[in-house]
Image (tube, rainbow, N blue to C red):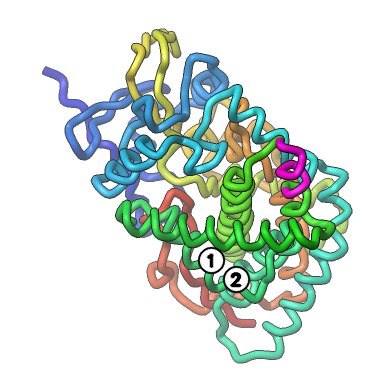
Amino acid sequence: MTTIPEYDIARSATCPLDPAPAMRARQEEGPLTRVQLWDGSTAWLVTGHAEHRAVLGHPEVSVEPARGLPRLSPAEAAAMDSVAKAGSASLGFIMMDDPEHARLRRMVTSAFTVKRVEAMRPATQQIADELIDRLLAGPKPADLVEAFALPLPSLVISNLLGVPYDDHEFFQADSRTIINRNSTPEQRGGAQLRLAEYLDGLIGEKLAKPGDDLLSGLVERVKAGELSRQEAARMGVLMLFAGHETTANMITLGTLALLQDPGQLALLRESDDPKLVASAVEELLRYLTITHGGLRRVALADIEIAGQVIRAGEGIIAVNETANRDPSVFPDPDRLDLRRNPRLHVTFGYGVHHCLGQPLARMELQVAYPALLRRIPTLALAAELEQIPFKHDGFVYGAYELPVTW
């Protein structure tokens, strides 16, 4: 009898920016394999690029927990059961299928258009420069996460939403609890409740005195009867934590990757070509792929992927980090190459659930990396790689700290 390998996302201590060795081993076996989860159940593991897109773009594949998404740990299983009982709406539209997902998503799409985001670039540049001024004026070594990577997107999303940045320690702490794989249902539920109550309070304030921000836009939808106040608060929670945690980790890991590759760092630092900067950001997104361990789905009907039939009710894990290292799409995929064309990467997902905030993330990264590298040309790591605490426990990969000096 063939033994089904275990699902294992542990990254190598010596190559922490690469996909887990077990994930690469499964990819070498084929783009679609079976893995065994912690409770003895099995799921389909999708590691190939074409197959990843086929799954995420398939109309008979669901993202709703109640339909039987794979559970990746005991804590997550309990949390998913709790979500299933409460309904997918308790986590916002990212855990809903169409048409309800599309209805709610349309309410906020206009805030993340390329045109609207580009208008935010000068203010984002000013935020970056002010943070770097403070970093340079402070002691060294310094923690780049605390000094720059986390406050930059937190300030940007706070301004966009209309959330007071003075509350950042509160919403950052609860955001980390929500995306931690090992958070208990009570911990995750408590964090979601606190954030929902916080956003509900802000929505109440904007009902009385609206401003020029995204929450005020949602308030107008509430007034028009298109959205309930509870739905508006949940959407606010989703955008608040997704809008800062992901980009903060990309700034951190991207800086680390560049500091380890002086040739690529120099290429980005010395170029004043916006197109090269934009392409470099795409390559860093491909190479690092901070979504950690895969996107969970479940088949609603029998579907065929890569010559295999996935039966209705079977769980699927589509692994972004291996799809982005598929050699059939990205030659020499384990090499960071800022001159390559990585436009087919799937870091932001694919299909109807592709990341809504990707224009904002791209703009922030296009500002952040050049600002750091040009303003601090002697920037260097102040710790050995094995001393850096990486986020092995979350759905979003990153580092808790990144000690730097100059």
- Residue 197: percent from the left, percent from the top? 53, 59
Amino acid at dot 1: Gln
Name the residue carrying label 2: 168
Residue pictured at 28% horizontal, 44% vertical: 78
Q: Is residue 42 left or right of residue 287?
A: left
- Residue 161: percent from the left, percent from the top? 72, 57
- Residue 134: percent from the left, percent from the top? 71, 84
- Residue 200: percent from the left, percent from the top? 60, 57
Q: Residues within 10 Å of mark 2 (few under 14, many from 20)?
A: some
Q: Is residue 114 left or right of residue 329?
A: right
The residue tagged with tag 1: helix, strand or loop? Answer: helix
Q: In the rendered image, is residue 392 in sight?
A: no
Residue pictured at 44% horizontal, 68% vertical: 385
**Marks 1 and 2, Cα distance to the nearest angstrom?**
6 Å
Q: Work out which quarter of the rendered image holds the C terminus and state it.
A: bottom right
Q: Nearer the viewer, residue 230 or 237?
A: 230
Residue pictured at 73% horizontal, 69% vertical: 373
Amino acid at dot 2: His
Q: Is residue 25 left or right of residue 221?
A: left
Name the residue carrying label 1: 172
Q: Nearer the viewer, residue 131 or 106?
A: 106
Main SS, magenta residues: helix
**Residue situated furthest left in the rendering:** 1
Q: In the rendered image, is residue 128 in sight?
A: yes
Instruction: Please state the extent of the stretch shown in magenta in the rendering.
Output: 219-225
Q: Nearer the viewer, residue 13 or 86?
A: 86
- Discs 1, 2 touching: Cβ within 8 Å: yes
